[in-house]
Amino acid sequence: METASHNVVSTLVNWWRDRSAANAELREIAALSQEDFAGVASDCGMTPCQLVSIVRAGPHAALEMNEMLHALNIDASSLTTNDRHLFNDMQAVCANCESKGECRRHLRDGTAARTYNEYCGNADTINALRADPDMLAD
């Protein structure tokens, strides 16, 4: 029982830390001029809306995307090098996904490669990437 309560407390502490970090980042963004914020977003290879969306979602909101790309044998580093904007679009979709629990479960149990089309907001993009031999991991 002690381990279960420790896990719950640890989960809550991590959630609170992530939310606090996201809120601090949003305050920093709000303090920027519109021009400076657009520059920061551009430096990140994103639109201002994408950057706000990802920051609001929290620092770990798109972790599943890299795991999914790996599970599907897509080379994430090639994607970031060859099409940074597409990678950022995919991150924004993942960060705001409402199927995270299902996605994590399928990634954990190894069924994501068979089931992602059922719930992943990036499924069409992923399917296009899988059809491109240059995007597959060696």
Image (cartoon, rainbow, N blue to C red):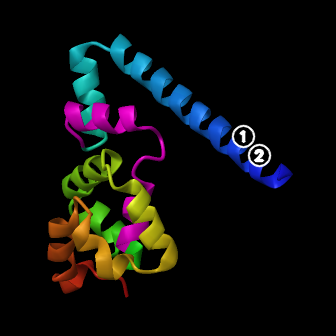
83 above or below 73? Answer: above
Q: Is residue 42 magenta?
A: no
Alpha carbons under labels 1 and 2: distance apart = 6 Å
Q: Is residue 52 magenta?
A: yes
| Left or right of 66, for residue 41 | left
Principal SS element in the magenta part? helix
128 above or below 18? Answer: below
Residue 37 on image: x %, y %: 28, 23
| Left or right of 22, for residue 129 | left
Dot 1, crowdedness within 10 Å: few (<14), some or many (≥20)? Answer: few
Residue 126 on image: x %, y %: 22, 71
Q: Residue at x 21, y 61 (%)?
A: 83
Q: Nearer the viewer, residue 79 or 67?
A: 67
Q: Residue at x 67, y 36 (%)?
A: 13
Q: Quarter of the image for the C terminus: give it.
A: bottom left
Where is mark 2, residue-wise? 5
To which quarter of the image does residue 31 belong?
Answer: top left
Amino acid type of the residue that numbered disc 2 sits on in the rendered structure? Ser
Where is mark 1, residue-wise? 9
User: Is label 1 in contact with label 2 (beta carbons under 8 Å)?
Assistant: yes
Q: Residue at x 26, y 64 (%)?
A: 119
| Left or right of 128, for residue 101 | right
Amino acid type of the residue that numbered disc 1 sits on in the rendered structure? Val
Q: Any mark on residue 58, and which?
A: none
User: Which element carries disc 1, helix, strand or loop?
Assistant: helix
User: Which element carries disc 2, helix, strand or loop?
Assistant: helix
Q: State the count of labels.
A: 2
Residue 92 on image: x %, y %: 27, 46
Q: Residue at x 15, y 68 (%)?
A: 124
Magenta-colored span = 46-69
Residue 15 on image: x %, y %: 57, 38
Q: Nearer the viewer, mark 1 or mark 2?
A: 2
